[in-house]
Image: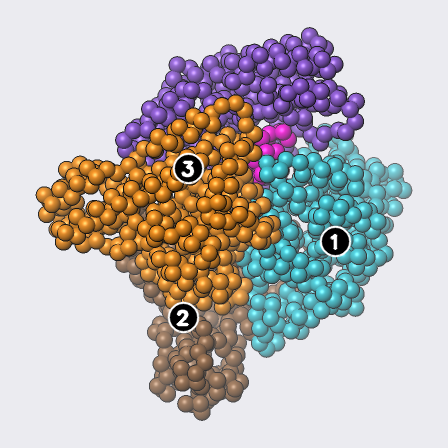
Chain colours: A brown, B orange, C cyan, D purple
Amino acid sequence: MNFASDNAGPVPAQVLEALARVNTGYAASYGGDDVTAEVADRVRDLFEAPGAAVYLVATGTAANALALATLCPPFGTIFCTQHAHIHEDECNAPEFYTGGAKLTLVPEGDMMTPATLRAAIEGEGNRGVHGPQRGPVSITNVTEGGNVYSVGEVAALCDVAQEFGLPVHLDGARLANACVKLGCTPAEMTWKIGVDIAVFGGTKNGLMDAEAVVIFDPDAPASSGYTRAQEFELRVKRAGHLYSKHRFVAAQFLAYLEDGLWRDLATRANARCETLAAGLEAMGVEIVNKTRANMLFFRAPLGVHDAVKAAGAVYHLMGNAPTSPKAVATGRLVCSWSTTEADVTSFLEAVKAAH
Amino acid sequence: MNFASDNAGPVPAQVLEALARVNTGYAASYGGDDVTAEVADRVRDLFEAPGAAVYLVATGTAANALALATLCPPFGTIFCTQHAHIHEDECNAPEFYTGGAKLTLVPEGDMMTPATLRAAIEGEGNRGVHGPQRGPVSITNVTEGGNVYSVGEVAALCDVAQEFGLPVHLDGARLANACVKLGCTPAEMTWKIGVDIAVFGGTKNGLMDAEAVVIFDPDAPASSGYTRAQEFELRVKRAGHLYSKHRFVAAQFLAYLEDGLWRDLATRANARCETLAAGLEAMGVEIVNKTRANMLFFRAPLGVHDAVKAAGAVYHLMGNAPTSPKAVATGRLVCSWSTTEADVTSFLEAVKAAH
Amino acid sequence: MNFASDNAGPVPAQVLEALARVNTGYAASYGGDDVTAEVADRVRDLFEAPGAAVYLVATGTAANALALATLCPPFGTIFCTQHAHIHEDECNAPEFYTGGAKLTLVPEGDMMTPATLRAAIEGEGNRGVHGPQRGPVSITNVTEGGNVYSVGEVAALCDVAQEFGLPVHLDGARLANACVKLGCTPAEMTWKIGVDIAVFGGTKNGLMDAEAVVIFDPDAPASSGYTRAQEFELRVKRAGHLYSKHRFVAAQFLAYLEDGLWRDLATRANARCETLAAGLEAMGVEIVNKTRANMLFFRAPLGVHDAVKAAGAVYHLMGNAPTSPKAVATGRLVCSWSTTEADVTSFLEAVKAAH
Amino acid sequence: MNFASDNAGPVPAQVLEALARVNTGYAASYGGDDVTAEVADRVRDLFEAPGAAVYLVATGTAANALALATLCPPFGTIFCTQHAHIHEDECNAPEFYTGGAKLTLVPEGDMMTPATLRAAIEGEGNRGVHGPQRGPVSITNVTEGGNVYSVGEVAALCDVAQEFGLPVHLDGARLANACVKLGCTPAEMTWKIGVDIAVFGGTKNGLMDAEAVVIFDPDAPASSGYTRAQEFELRVKRAGHLYSKHRFVAAQFLAYLEDGLWRDLATRANARCETLAAGLEAMGVEIVNKTRANMLFFRAPLGVHDAVKAAGAVYHLMGNAPTSPKAVATGRLVCSWSTTEADVTSFLEAVKAAH
C-alpha cells in the first residue's frame, strides 16, 4: 500500500505495448516522425483546438518552465500560490528558464481567488521600471494541496488575468484527475475559459515520462518577439529537451489517448481516493482538502502515522515533522491508476487499528 | 521643501571640488589609478578591516546585485523582507545577476526577527534538490520602512545566518544614517557582528553616484568557485559596471571620507528628520516607523496630504493611493544633507494649517 | 538503407525487455530506486572508477550542457572546435546552462591538436577582467566529422588543459563507437588520461533516450562553490532533467551494460561502416574522414548523390547544398547497430550504378 | 606623452562646469529631470531623428550589451568581428545581458565586408532549431583596429543585414572620431544608412562616464515582445544602470553637445593622430591601420618600443609580447582631446632616437 506519489508506481501495459509497436524501421528524428504528428493531431482533437500547437517533453518541470519562459520576459513576474509546484518543487526552474523573472506569491494556501489574485496583480504594477512587470498567471489544477478548482473558479481567475492583459498558464500535471472530477471536457477547463497554455500531464497518470504542452494560440507573440510556437520550439532545443528518438516519447502519449486510457486511469485513481476519504471520514479523521481528485491530506497524531506506517503504508508527512507522538501531523495520500482496492482496505484497517 | 527622496537634492561642494582636484594629467584606467587605491585604503581604515576588498560602483542596485551574485548560486535563495529594495525596487536585478536565484520573503513588514528569519530558513531547506538551496541573508539598515535595527538586532540575525552556515549581505544604501543614529562605528555594525559583505552607500547621502562594496573576507569562496574578490571583479566588468575613468568615481568617495564628511551629512539629515518627527508628534500625527534615521512615515487623511502638497511640499504617498479625502494615507518624508531647517519649519506649518 | 543518423533507427529488443522487467511494483522516485543505484554501480565498474558519481539524463545536449555548466563559470569560456556539437547543434545550450559563458573555437576543422589548443588558451588569458576567463576544454570523440582521436591524442590535449589548470569534458555521444575502434577500455580513454567528466552516450548506440554523465572527481569544487556532484544534481533538477520515474531511464542503461551490449552494438555499427568504406574506396570514391568509427563522409557529384537517393538511400549532404549536378557535395553516412549488411550492399550498388 | 588609451586623460573644463551648473535645488530622480529631457532633445536634433528614444548609461560595455539584449533573443547569435570590443573586451557582457546568446565571428581582422558578413549569416541559418537563430549585426566604427569604415561601407553592411531581416547595432564608442574623419553628419553614418541602434560614445572623447544610446525606431518590437524603448528602459533598471541622480550624467552630455564640443574634441584627437602618422611614415615606420581617426598601430622591433617607453612614452603592445629585442611588435597609440602637439613631437623624437 504505497501512497507516496503518483510517480512511484508502474506503467500500464498499454504503454509498453505502444513502445514495442513503434519500434520498427527508421523514422525522422527530433519529432519529425509520424507518431509525433499523430499524437499532436489527437491532442488537438481531444482539446477541440484545431489550431493549437502541441509539444511533448519528458518532465513536468520542463513543461512548466518552458511554457512560462514563453510567456514571461526576464523582467516580469509570474503570479502563483506559495504551494505551486513551480515555486516549491522545481529548484528555481522558472527563474532559470525565464532568465531571472520573479514569482509573486498570491496568499494564502494552495488556491487563489479572484480577489487575492487581483490584489497581487495590483500590488506589482505600480512602480514603473523599478518593480517587475506583470507576467503570466499560473494556475495549478489539481492543486498541490489536493484541491480541485471548479471550471467556474478557473474561469474567474482567467477573467482577472484578462482584465490586466496577462496570459494564463495551467500546470496540469494532474489535469486528467481534475477533468474526471469535474466531469467536463479538456476544452471546457482550458481554452474555453481563458487558459493560454496548458500542460496536459501524462507521467503522474501512468506514463513513463511524457507531458504534452498545448499552446492554444501559437501565433501570438511570445516573450522574445517570436511567436509562441517558434519560441517554445527553440527553448525546448536549447534546454536539451528535444528528444532525438522522439517517437518513443510520442508512443506513450499515443497509448494514453487511445480509447480514453488517460480518462480511465484517472478515474481509477480518483475512485480509490474517494473510498479512502469515505473510510477516514467514517472514523472521524480530519481531511484537510475538501474537493479531492486523487490526493488526500489527513491530520492525525504522529503516533497514529507511525503505527500505520509500521503496518506497511508508505506516504509522506507534510512540513517539518514533529517529534512528539501526540503532536498532530498531516499525511499526504496519493492514489494512482495502480492503487488497488486492497491497498485502500489495508490502509483503512491500519488507521483503525492505530486509533 | 522637497522630501521626495535622498536622491533628489544637490551634492555638497566638496564632491565637485574633489572631481576638479583629480582632473589633472593621465591615470591608469579601470581602477588602476592612485585615487582608487587611496579610497580603498581609507575605507579599510574606516571599517577597521585591513584585509577587506573594496570596490566602487555607481548605483545601489548594482552594488546589491553584484554582492548577492557573489554569495548566491543560481539554484539558491536569498532571505530578505518583502519590503527590501532588492525585492521591490530593482526590477529583478538580483534574479538577473545570480542567474535565476529566488528571494524568500521573511514576513512581515520591513524588519526580520531571529524567529521569523529562522522559520524562513527552516522552511526552505527540507526538499533536497527540489527546492532552492539556502543562500545569503540580506539585511537592510536603515530599512525601507525607515526603521533602524540596533547593533544587537543585526547581530542576532547574523547569528541565525551563521547557525545555518549562510553568509550575510548588508544593504547599506543608508548605512551612514544608521551608523549616526546608532552612535557606533562602521565596524561595530558590520563585520564585528557577522556581516560578510556591506554596501556603504554614498549616493543617497550626498554623492553623485558612488557606492562602496566592502568584502570583509575576500579570499572566501564565492558562488563560482573563485574567491569572492575575484568573482566580484569579474562580475563587475561583465555587467558593464567597471568605469574606465575610475578616478572620477573614486574622487567622490575621497571627498566623502575626508574629515568625516559622510558622517556630517548623515548627521544633518537625521537631525532634520528628528525635528520633523517632534513637530508632527506634538500635533498628534501618527508616525509609523519608531526608530528613525532620516526617513519618516506618517499617516494622515488624504485631504491633509493634498493641502500640504498644495502648500509646496513634495513627497510620496505609499501604496495605491486612495481617492476619498477622508481616507488615511501614509506619506514618506526623506531628509537629506541638503534639507534645511526652513524646509522643516515650512512643512510643519503646512501640516498644522491643513489639520 | 537509412544512413541519416544513428538516432533514426529502432532500439534492440533488450531495451524494451528491460523496461518490462522493471515495470513492477512501487519504487522511490527521482532516482532513489534500486535500478538507478545498480546502474551507477555498473558504470563505475565499467569505468574502473569506484569513486565516480554517475547520473542519467535523456539527451546528449542536456548531458553536455549540464556537465559544462558544472565546470565553467558564467564569465568563462569553453574551448572546443568549430564543429563541436555543443557549438553547432545545441541552440546555445551551453551558453544557457552556464549563464552566459562563451565558446572559444579552436581552429580548424573537427579536431584539435595540442598546438592549436594551446594557442587558443593562450589567446584568451591575457586581458584580465576584460576577457572571459579560461574554462574547460571540451573534446568530442568520435568527432562530429567522423574522426576518432587516438588515446594518445586525447591524452596530449588533456595534458595541455592540465598545464593551464583547466578541466576536461568529453562529449562521448559516440564514446562506445570510439572505444570499440580504439580497442581500449572506457577508463583508458577517459580518466586515466585526464578527462574530468565524460558523457557516455546511449541514445545514438541503441537506447531510446539515455546518456550517462560520469564525474570522476565528484568532490572537486564546481563552478558554484558546491562540489561537482552536488552542483550537477541541482542543475539537473533546476533544468527539469530529473525524471520522476527514474527507473525507466535506468532500465535502458541496465540493458546497455548487460553482457556488453553497448560494445556489441557499437561493434556492429563500426563494422558496417568499414564495409561501406572499403566498398567506396574500391570504387575510387573520396572519403573525407580518415579514422572512422560508425560515420563516413564521402565526396561525390551532386548528380551521384541524387541518383543514390533515388535508389532509396537516405542520408544528409553537408553544408549549403550546391545546385549544379556536377558540383561536388559531401554526403554523411551514419551506421547504427541496426544497419544491415544488406543495407550496405544496396548502397554500394546504388553508388556503383550512379557513377 | 601618454598614448595608452582615450580613457586615461582628464576631462575638459566644460564638463565640470556643467556639473556645477546643474548642482542646484531638487530634481526628479531616475531620469525624470529637465536636464535629461533636454539632452534627449539635443541628441535627437543632432541625429535629425525626432522620433528616436535616447538613453544615457555610464559605460560603453553597458551601452552595447543593453542594446544587443534589446535586439537579440537568448537563442540568437550576434554577428561581429573577432576584434569587436563586445567579443574581446567585455568579459561576456553580451552573453550575460542577452541571457545566453552567441557571438558569430565574421573573419578576418577588425573589419567586415558584405561578402564575409553574408557568408557568416548564411552559415548560421540552416540548422533549424539546432543552431542559434540569426540575430543583430554589430558594427564598430572606429574599429578596434583603428580603422574607419566609410559611410558607403557601413551602408553596404546594413544592406546585407536588411536582406536577411536583421537589425544593426553600431558600437560608436568612438563615433565622434569616425564622424569627424568621415566629414559627415551623425545621421548620415547611422539611421540614414540602416543602423537601428547607435551608441554615441562620450567617455573616450572627453566625458567622465557617459554614453548615449540612440534607438531610432523605439516602437519596433524588441527581443521580449515589448517595444525596443520599453525593453531598453527595463533592462537598464534591472542591470543597475539607471542612475538616481541622473542629472549628473545628463549634465556631462549637455556640455558635450553645446557648441559642438564633441566635434571639437574629436577633431583635436584626430589631428594629433595624423601628425603622429605623418611623422612615423616619414621615418619609414610601418603603420598597420590605413584609415585612421585617433588611433594608430605601428610595427617596430621590441628594442625600439623599449627605448621609446624608456623615454617616457606610455602605450600598449598588442598580443602576447615577444621577448627578443629584434622581434617585431605592434604598438597602439591612442590620441585624445588632451593629447598635445608637444606630446606628439616628443614621441616622434623618441622613435627617431631609438631607430
**Are discs 2 and 3 less than 8 Å apart at CB?**
no
Q: Residue at x 87, y 45 (%)?
A: C279
Residue B292 point in image, percent of width and height: 28, 52
Q: CA gap, disc 2 to disc 3?
A: 63 Å
Specify whether disc 3 shares its chain with disc 1: no
In the image, which residues are magenta?
D74-93
Quarter of the picture containing the C terminus of chain A is: bottom left
In the rendered image, residue A234, in percent from the top left (x then y), is placed at: 55, 46
**C-alpha separation, residue under disc 1 versus residue under disc 2:** 47 Å
Query: Is residue D300 visible in the rendered structure shown here?
Result: yes
The chain identifier of the residue carrying mark 1 reads C
Residue B97 placement, left or right of B290? right
Give the structural element (helix, strand or loop) at label 2: loop
Residue D56 lies in the magenta stretch: no
* Residue type for callout 1: Val
Work out how far the residue at label 3 is from the one at label 1, CA to CA, in angstroms.
55 Å
Q: Name the residue tied to disc 3.
A: B258
Q: Residues within 10 Å of mark 3 (few under 14, many from 20)?
A: few
At 32% from the left and 58% from the top, the residue drawn is B109
Residue positioned most to the front: B259
Chain under disc 3: B
Q: Nearer the viewer, residue C206 or D107?
A: D107
Q: Residue C195's mark? A: 1
Q: Quadrant of residue D156?
A: top right
Q: Considering only vertical position in the picture, is B282 above or below C332?
A: below
Q: Is residue C38 left or right of residue B28?
A: right
Residue C135 in picture, x, y percent from top left: 66, 46
The amino acid type of the residue labelled 3 equals Glu
- Name the residue located 77 percent from the left edge and 55 percent from the top edge: C190
Regarding residue D164, the answer to whether it shows in the image is no
Q: Which residue is mark 2?
A: A146
